[in-house]
Amino acid sequence: MIFMFLAVVSLFMALPLVYAIVQSLKPINEIFAYPPRFFVQRPTISNFRQVFILSDSLWVPFTRYLFNSVFVSVIGTVIYVLISTAAAYPLAKGKFAGKALVFNMVVWTLLFTTEVTAVPKYLVVAKLGLVDTYWALIFPYFANTLGVFLVRQFIVSSIPDSTLEAARIDGASEYRIFRSIVIPSVKPAWLTLTILAFKDLWNGGSSGDYIYSESLKGLNAAMSSIAAGGLGRTGAACAVAVLMMIPPIIIFLYSQSSVMETMTHSGLK
Amino acid sequence: MNLPQSLSKAEIRKSAPYYVLLAPFLLFFIVFMLIPVLSAIALSFTDFNMVQVPHIVGLKNYVQIFLNDEVFMKAFRNTLVFAAVTGPVGYILSFVVAWLINEMGRKTRTVITFLVYAPSLTANVYFIWTYLFSSDTSGFLNNLLIKMGIISDPIYWLTDVKYNFSVVMVVIIWLSFGTGFLAFVSGLQALDKTYYEAAALDGLKNRWQELYYVTFPQMGPQLLFGAVMSISGAFAVGYHNKALTGFPSTDYSTHTILLHALDYADNRYELGYASAVSVILFALMILSWILVNKVLKKFNDE
């Protein structure tokens, strides 16, 4: 019974992803075959090759979209992990005025995803002159408080006060403590933030609203314009989908045990 | 007499590093979260349209929304139904799956966790569903149903108002095994095993009692965290509807509050009105969080 249930759930979860992989490997005649078969008979990589040379349905070369996505997600993830970890330490162990206020705001705004604040955020992005720059895709993401929250919870339950006290008695400054004690001991937490931020930035989400120039758009834009090309483009669109699945999956598999360790501390009290 | 002052100066010097470490995050948080939310509240009382100087119009936007905007009422109802179904279903399914795989071997658990989390990981691959639900006879589901003799003509899954709402709901549930699910899996793993032994000695009869009396109380913090994640996802519904069923969907059948706000902002430049719509969405999210928080806390205290 339990196995049946889990099998059904897993099948349901995996179906679209498997379908994307299968379609991406189909030659054009199999995509149009009637009646359609689920599995591919003669796998080919022509769809993937087509994506890289396809110019009629894309405005700029595919490699440009690829570069934009890589740039935005890598730079964004690195900075996000740094500033979230830095902010988490004072919120976990510091004593200063306003600490409770800041932490409460962090918890409350966990409710607000980037999508729901899109309308008022657009005005801010526009006022700052960020519309149509890479920063419009990167900066607003840094207001996502999940990172600060997760690292803060991790520090609270994994670094004892006595360790920090001992370091202070030895004359270490707070910065020194942060660098030599906090950062190394919260490695699972920042690995977790790496995958969470990377997948969000890589997948693009709603941030496309701030970009007009085709030359600054990412893979998700390329994927939708190819998919909009109709049934004949199914293979190519699925090939992009498969290419887009690979990086987040690899990073997740690499960091899965760290993610699970971090999530142990994620509880809200 | 100078002592308190010098003391507070020392205090400030002592806490200075904390402010420095906090500063970069706080800057982005204020600029891209606090200011947008607060300005939405302020603009919701104006007729701001990006061109003219805004005037304060009091509650006019809100009155207009609730009394004269039929499309909004549809979006409002849809959002509530989406949230009330996909939120709890995603939440409960996440917990049930996490609970079922908890006592399996490490390998099985890792594989299933990965499989179930994969859609959230590859979030924008959800457009694949449009192929599965494609409206012609070669669409995956239509073809399957025709072959099995259940239907004779293809169903317009994404545009027929009888089906498209449910289809979007299926896709959103598919995407709802996210951060909350991971928190459940690892929270269950970290539970103190000695409680279970003690409870068994105390005469717990079955696994349901064990779940109720031992697991839930210990999982309280994770359950709360998962609830925040569920609510934030459940009310942010809109972008997927737009991608799957088009904008506007047939008769606004999958229209939501978020899409309504985006429509007024992006297409009509009525920012004051769009802000009021956004503020209503914020209020709904906060209200449901307060409610869920109360229920879960009460449940935990028992």
Image (cartoon, coloured by chain):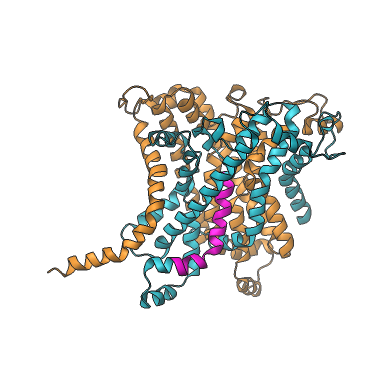
Depicted B302 relative to depicted B241: above or below: below
Among the chains pictured, the one given orange colouring is B
Residue B86 lies in what quarter of the image?
A: top right
- Residues B234 and B77: in front is B234
Chain A: colour as depicted: cyan
Task: Assign the N terminus of chain A to one quadrant of the image.
Answer: bottom right
- Residues B141 and B295: in front is B141
- Residues B75 and A115: in front is A115
Residue at position x 48%, y 70% in the image: A159
Specify the segment rendered in magenta: A179-201
Residue B4 lies in what quarter of the image?
A: bottom left
Depicted B65 relative to depicted B85: above or below: above
Instruction: Tell whether position A185 is magenta.
Output: yes
Depicted B103 relative to depicted A113: above or below: below
* Residue A237 seen anywhere in this rendered image of the structure: no
* Residue B156 seen anywhere in this rendered image of the structure: yes
Instruction: Tell whether position A212 is magenta.
Output: no
Q: Residue furthest left?
A: B1
In the image, taking residue A239 as reference, residue B278 lies left or right, namely left
